[in-house]
Amino acid sequence: MKRISLTQHLIEQQREHNSIPAELRLLIEVVARACKTISHAVGKGALGDVLGTAHSENIQGEVQKKLDVISNEILLEANEWGGHLAAMASEEMESIHPIPNRYPMGEYMLLFDPLDGSSNIDVNVSIGTIFSVLKAPEGMRTPHEQDFLQPGTRQVAAGYAVYGPQTVLVLSTGNGVHCFTLDREMGSWVLTQRDMKIPAQTKEYSINTSNSRHWHAPVKRYIAELEEGQGGPRGKDFNMRWVASMVADVHRILTRGGIFMYPADTREPDKPGKLRLMYEANPMAFLVEQAGGAATDGRGRILDIQPVKLHQRVPVFLGSKEEVERVTAYHADN
Ligand code: AHM
Ligand code: MG
């Protein structure tokens, strides 16, 4: 098999589609390099003294794990000096991180969840990094949070890495979704799947059912129908999978289909769901749509949402198109 590296793939995409300017390619390669470093740190586990909590809280009031903090630092340091970015924003930082003025300022802005699936770190279950790339607004001099508040349709690239049995990087620059596997001996990303596609139909769903008593009626109805299986209105049996790392659940869906849901519920009306729009839902929605799937907040397309704040949360329904459309239609009925 001819091995195609990440660099070669990006250059070829640029030639074919003219969609990846050199600066963007550099940015993606730096993010990929940082993911390699994070993968290495994750892989050391107890031997690297990277497990456990960091005795600090992030902006969402969640206790940070040591690896959350380490991964955030790795991404910041890797991306600061290259000259391709104007600012960064992260799940782990309350405010945006403008590029220090000792470095040249670029035209892109990077958002990330440095280590998604934090509850799985200490138990050796797949975790990952999610990222989203936006362009800085025309004429921007000093970056502010406001400059990041662009709908997901404006993303120029998005991707995630999964640190699992294999370390993979899944990426889109708007011309399909492509998967790279880290060759641990060579230290390089090798293209292992071109054009990932999500089948429109599925028999697999993914939701944290421990919250079921709090769900709103449309979600209760949808899940009840799936659970009824062959004898119910859907006329077929469904299987359920919940890793509790969005990266791993989405990766399964990109590989073999399925629907992933993290709905809003009745508990806290001011907190619509758990996942964050700008660095979790938007990049995943971009990838899922690029792979032929759909992503909504139960009402409309996630990528069309005009963000109002950096750390805002959003209900998420994504994956196989027919299922996402069905649960979204149930919301409209309500
Ligand atoms: P995190 O970014 O703090 O790790 O939280 C996001 C994660 C998602 O990866 C996952 O889908 C979800 O939280 C799991 O939530 P739950 O604890 O309800 O299973
Ligand atoms: Mg996360």
Image: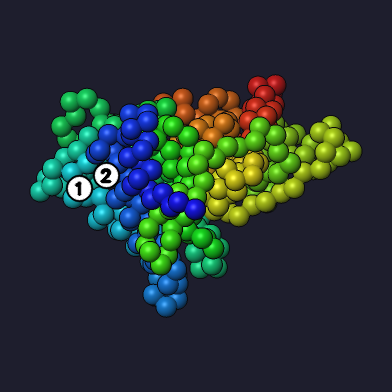
Mark 2, Cα crowd under 10 Å, few <14 / some 14-19 / many 20+, is some
Task: Determine if residue 272 is in view.
Answer: no
The percent coordinates of residue 48 (x first, y second) are: 39, 75
**2 or 1: tag closer to the N-terminus:** 2
In the image, the residue with mark 1 has its CB under 8 Å from the nearest atom of ligand 2:
no
x 43%, y 52%: residue: 3
The percent coordinates of residue 320 (x first, y second) are: 64, 35
Give the camera-side residue of 328 and 192: 192
User: Farthest residue in the bottom direction?
Assistant: 47
- Is 131 situated above or below 183? above
- Is 63 situated above or below 272? below
x 42%, y 78%: residue: 47
Q: Do the residues labelled 2 and 1 touch (CB within 8 Å)?
A: yes
- The type of colouring in the image is rainbow
User: Farthest residue in the right direction?
Assistant: 231
Give the camera-side residue of 60 and 22: 22
The percent coordinates of residue 182 (x first, y second) are: 43, 58
Residue under label 2: 26
Give the camera-side residue of 305 and 308: 305
Which three-letter amino acid code belongs to the residue tagged 1? Gly
- Which of pointers 2 and 1 indicates the residue nearer the eye? 2
Residue under label 1: 82
Image quadrant occupied by the C terminus? top right
